[in-house]
Amino acid sequence: MKRERFPPDDPREWTSRARSNLALARNVIPDADLEDLCFDAQQAAEKGIKAVFIHRGETFPFSHDLDKLLRLLERNGHRIPKYVNEAKELTQYAHETRYPGITDPVARREYRRAVRIATAVLRWAELQIAKA
């Protein structure tokens, strides 16, 4: 499916890529590991948060630590809602679950929570960008 592309310094490109990751995360197919789907949920949230940085004209560190990214937005004067702060739970999916044997397998309940959090963070990010 072809979509409109934007330059990498346009927050719309970041939210578009975040929506793509979220679509992958929601797509439970045979042989897909929940750990991999949670990684896509984490990526959706991360790209949404980074889109807010870009929208605000701020630079962000190349980090998968969502708590770190949100704290930096907060230090720069941006109010972060409590439900968005839950994104810090997703950071583990950028690291520990990417490779076999580092952690226990992800339970279906954990997977559903990861997708819910990523969905909420992306909606929040899109609202921040729409306020322009």
Image (cartoon, rainbow, N blue to C red):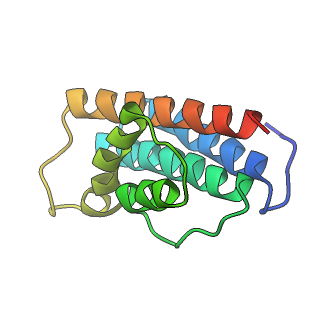
Q: Which of 76 and 89 is in front in this view?
A: 76
Image check: 63 left or right of 32?
right
Q: Quadrant of residue 7?
A: bottom right
Q: Nearer the viewer, residue 127 or 91?
A: 127
Image check: 26 left or right of 19?
left
- Residue occupying the point 85% across, 50% down: 5
- Residue occupying the point 68% across, 51% down: 14
Q: In which quarter of the image is residue 113?
A: top left
| Residue 73 visible in the snapshot | yes
| Residue 30 visible in the snapshot | no
Image check: 63 left or right of 47?
left
Residue extending farthest bottom: 62
Q: Where is residue 54 in the image (x, y as percent from the top left)?
A: 70, 58
Quadrant containing the N terminus in the rendered view: top right
> In the displayed structure, would residue 77 be above or below residue 9?
above
Count of residue discs: 0
- Residue occupying the point 78% across, 62% down: 9
> In the displayed structure, would residue 2 be above or below residue 28?
below
Quadrant containing the C terminus in the rendered view: top right
- Residue occupying the point 32% across, 60% down: 98
Image check: 116 left or right of 45?
left
Q: Position of residue 126 (x, y in %)?
A: 66, 35
Residue extending farthest front: 77
> In the displayed structure, would residue 101 be above or below residue 123?
below
Residue extending farthest left: 104
Q: Position of residue 80 (x, y in %)?
A: 46, 42
